[in-house]
Image (tube, rainbow, N blue to C red):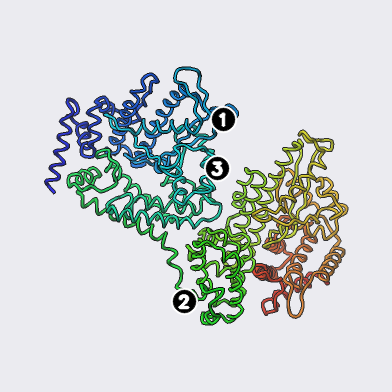
Amino acid sequence: MDATRDETDAIADRALARFPGPAQEGELRERLRRVAIASDFAIDTLVRQPELLARLATDVGAGPLPPPVLDAGRRDDWPRQLRLYRAAESTRLVWRDVLGLDDVDATLAGTTRLAERCLEIALEALEQDFARRHGLVRDGEGNAVRLVVFGMGKLGGGELNFSSDIDLVYAYEHGGESRPEAGPGARSLVAEDYFARLGQQLAGLLDEPTVDGFCHRVDLRLRPFGNAGRVALSFAALELYFQREGRDWERYAWQKARPVAGDVEAGRRFLETLRPFVYRRYLDFGALDGLRGMKAMIAAEVARKELADDIKRGPGGIREIEFLAQALQLIRGGREPALREPRLLHALAALRDAEQVGADTAQALAEDYRFLRRLENRLQMLRDAQTHALPESPVDRERVARGLGHGDWNALVQVLAGHRERVSREFDALLSQREQQPAVAVDVADYWRALPGGGAAAALAQAGYADAANVDAVLRDFARSPAVRELPDATRARLDRVMPVLLQATAPATFPLQAIRRLLALLQNILRRASYLALLDEQPPALARLVDVVTRSALLAERLAAHPLLLDELLDARADGPLPQRELFAEACRPACGLETEAALFSLNEIRQQLSFRIALATLDRRQPAQDSTRQLAWLADAVVGTVLVLARRELESAHGTIPSSGFAVLGYGSLGGEELGFGSDLDLVFVYDAPPDAQSDGARPLDPPRWFARLAQKIVALLGAVTGGGRLYDIDVRLRPDGGQGLLVSTIASYDEYQRERAWTWEHQALVRARFIAGDETLRAAFERIRAGTLGRARDAGKLREDVVSMRARMRGELDRSRDGLFDLKQGEGGLVDLEFLLQYLVLREAATHPALLSPRATPPLIDALAQAGVLDAPLARDLHAAHALLVTAGLECTLDRRPRLVAQDPALAETRAQVSGAWRSHGLRD
């Protein structure tokens, strides 16, 4: 140990002896000594470029060096200029890294910027030379076409290591032919040859060794078909290749792609078109199979080349961190744009924020990555060698360990082993989740694989199925269906792993045949979308959750079958957390406003499906009261309607312009207004507007206000009910508008006011109790509130009011109550929800003239509270009505979630609830 330490000190002394004068004194000498221990390359460069040491010794050396200017008349000097510049700037990075002036993030960013500058300088010089000799390639419209240089790997990710090669792919946006000016040697070239030659010369200018070394090693093998492929391809050819030939490893490669030189804007446009290849729109757990394949190849390479000490490719190395993050990004990046991050450390932060990686895990992996990358850089800084292997020489080991601040090599190795062990554990856990599926009885697995021709129902009976014969028949029909028979081998293998688990899990269900039918309906829909099946295969928690949800809820089973994207909610940690509050629903919908209408509707449907599914899960699991769920569903509807209003207004204004000094509002009635919306409920909407009577819109095709606002309302109704690939937003009911089906779809606020004052029926004033402003202009919100308060707050004849309410309730019950044979209609039955609503509405209309506080609440619970505070309801009755409302809403949602009519068998709790509501009717003088 002492010998190696002495030899290391001797190396530093010999290096110092190469610098005369001031370098032998004071702080500069100590700095040079530390650099000499860490990097022969840096010392050699400083000796050859003494002015660089003078620069580094001052504050001027803090910033990057000025790049060289490549003179078109001195092309032979370009290689030397580039190599001297790269050596000097790399030495500056070594200096700052070794002396602790930069952290590893800054070093990686600096190395990346250096490569980008060299590419830009070299390409611009070559482009000017090509333009003189061959002219410019122009597209069909005469615009110049430039080469696009895509940086891949760590260059694309902005985290290039010190002595790395740079992975490049060349492309160009449009074909065409160059048109040189007349002159000696001038020659026209087609785009394919033009850009291929330009790209080859760019690689040679950077890569070819000279007496000054190299600038950057260039690797072009990531292009389509590798070395056998064309050097530069058009965007169209690249798109066609990825559509037909694209492989899993290329998705990982292009995930980090970034245009780094040439026509950068065109490169960005291309990457946007390529995004669906890299990031699938649906959850893509199939990416893990690609990762398994790459891991197997790397493991074979490690074994073959004895790379156990390779900190990049070996176990627990840099690639495992990269692949772990990339796999998680590929799985969800199609759905969550924030995860489409080429920089690894930023990707880990995004995965943490999206709750796909725990905060502690993300921090640990970031620490591991920084440690490994810093060590990798020091291995390469030693002699500017592209190495990732731990050194074998005792002296080199001593130099690396001391340069990194460790007492000796063993101390460094011990710390390194801890990092690599932690990385391996996380990486292996990602790929081993599939193996955590519960053990399945061999008989069940064999039974499934023998279908449709073989197998015996006895295996199902033995597994616990009470109705084994009927389950067997259903499974045989499924197994012989074309969708199953025609599956590719890989997908069939996934199905063969998933089905036995499903069969075993559903055997104990109360209604196993029903559960199997629901699951098979879902499987039929996802068999042709291998990524959904991969989710169930790769994620045991999702499979277990699926069985649980489908067994208990027909509604959620149907929604999963119709919209497999909702399978994500079975895994998303956020689905088990608190539900969003009102403002967050609006925030979730807001991005749709920036999309074209068709895309916006598709996005809104997905958002609505996901959030309502999340609410349904919380309800099904009893993680929140049913009343909270109905309120959240109403908030979600508010957000969707508000967004659709923006879309509809935008379309109308583009065609007809705007109407100055006007306003528009959407009012919600019924369960939407009362914030008591159910799953699948329609929306009761009323539209009002205000505009100068002689106004016209200011567009190319002007309209007067009645027609402009009528079209706006029609468009809102049409967009909310439009069928898209993501479903339909809501069914709309507009019959509660003034004059009902005979009235105009949209009313002026003045006519709405006049109608409420002069012509509205008592039942319409009852409906107004629950009405509220949903979306539109704030001036109309204030006007509507004034009209509503004035209408509800006027004095009424109590006897006439009582007669109208009782009469209308009796009529509704006679037409709508489905109670029969010991079954009770939760909504329309006597003592049910509508009775409770009518009671509260009656009391508000009767008492609001003397108790203005009754005018504010719309929903049932706050209405009960307001009536109690006003002394209209006594405290015990108010408590009873709260309990009755909670029970009725909960029972109703349970029926809806399992697709059952809201008819329930009588039980003591329900009988007590009905008695409480009916008793309240009697105590307030209502008779029906």
Q: Is the residue marked by circle 1 packed among few (<14), some (14-19), or many (20+) residues within 10 Å? A: some
- Residue 139 — which label? 1
Quadrant position of the C terminus in the picture: bottom right
* Measured Cα–Cα span from mark 3 to mark 2: 47 Å
- Callout 3: helix, strand or loop? helix
Name the front one of labels 1 and 2: 1
Mark with earlier residue (1, 2): 1
Three-letter code, disc 2:
Ala
Residue 803: image location, x then y, percent: 86, 66
Which of 776/318 is in front? 318
Mark with earlier residue (3, 2): 3
Is 734 situated left or right of 556 in this image? right
Identify the residue position indicated by label 3 in the image.
273
Three-letter code, disc 3:
Thr
Q: Is the residue marked by circle 3 packed among few (<14), some (14-19), or many (20+) residues within 10 Å? A: few
Residue 889: image location, x then y, percent: 67, 67
Residue 789: image location, x then y, percent: 77, 52
Q: Is the residue marked by circle 2 packed among few (<14), some (14-19), or many (20+) residues within 10 Å? A: some
Which of 529/141 is in front? 141
Residue 460: image location, x then y, percent: 54, 79
Q: Residue furthest toward the top?
A: 183
> Does residue 624 appear anywhere in the picture?
no
- Residue 441 — which label? 2
Residue that appears at 72% across and 56% down? 853
Three-letter code, disc 1:
Asp
Residue 218, picture quadrant: top left
